[in-house]
């Protein structure tokens, strides 16, 4: 399994984990830990074509805030990023 952590972000990519709820469990724990810490809003960015990640975050209560166009280069190509956020109903 490959786990990436960067600027407070967590990403998991492995074919063996796909469809087994690993991403949802990690995201649920992230949400719970931020609520325990009193953090009201979580923000993240997702490439527009990453439909699986967008669906996962939507199911966990995230909403699309907007699109940051040409935010940065990835492998030499300028990329847009969909900005999402989740505001805790518990805080």
Image (tube, rainbow, N blue to C red):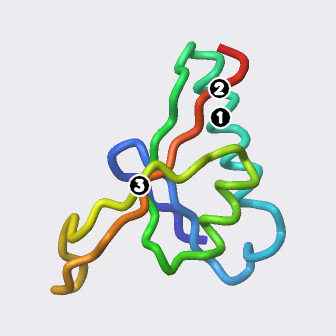
- Asked if residue 49 is positioned above or below residue 67 in the image, the reply reads below
Q: In the visual, does 74 lie left or right of 58?
A: left
Secondary element at tag 1: helix
Q: Residue visible at 55% across and 21% down?
A: 40
CB contact under 8 Å: marks 1 and 3: no
Q: Which residue is mark 3?
A: 66
Q: Which residue is mark 2?
A: 88
Q: In the visual, does 29 lie left or right of 64?
A: right
Q: Residue visible at 74% across and 80% down?
A: 16
Residue 14 or residue 53, whichever sits in front = 53
Q: Residue visible at 71% across and 22% down?
A: 89
CB contact under 8 Å: marks 1 and 2: yes
- Asked if residue 20 is positioned above or below residue 32 in the image, the reply reads below
Q: Residue visible at 65% across and 34% down?
A: 31
Q: Quadrant of the C terminus?
A: top right
- First along the sequence among labels 2 and 3: 3
Secondary element at tag 3: strand
Q: CA distance from mark 1 to mark 2?
A: 8 Å
Secondary element at tag 2: loop
- First along the sequence among labels 1 and 2: 1
Residue 88 location (% of width, % of height)? 65, 26
Residue 74 tag number = none
């Amino acid at each position: 399994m490959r786990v990436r952590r960067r600027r407070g972000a967590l990403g998991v990519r492995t074919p063996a984990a796909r469809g087994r709820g690993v991403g949802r469990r990690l995201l649920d724990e992230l949400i719970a830990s931020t609520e325990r810490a009193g953090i009201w809003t979580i923000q993240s960015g997702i490439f527009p074509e990453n439909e699986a990640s967008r669906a996962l975050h939507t199911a966990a209560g995230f909403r699309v805030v907007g699109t940051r166009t040409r935010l940065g280069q990835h492998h030499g190509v300028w990329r847009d990023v969909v900005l999402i956020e989740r505001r805790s109903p518990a805080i």
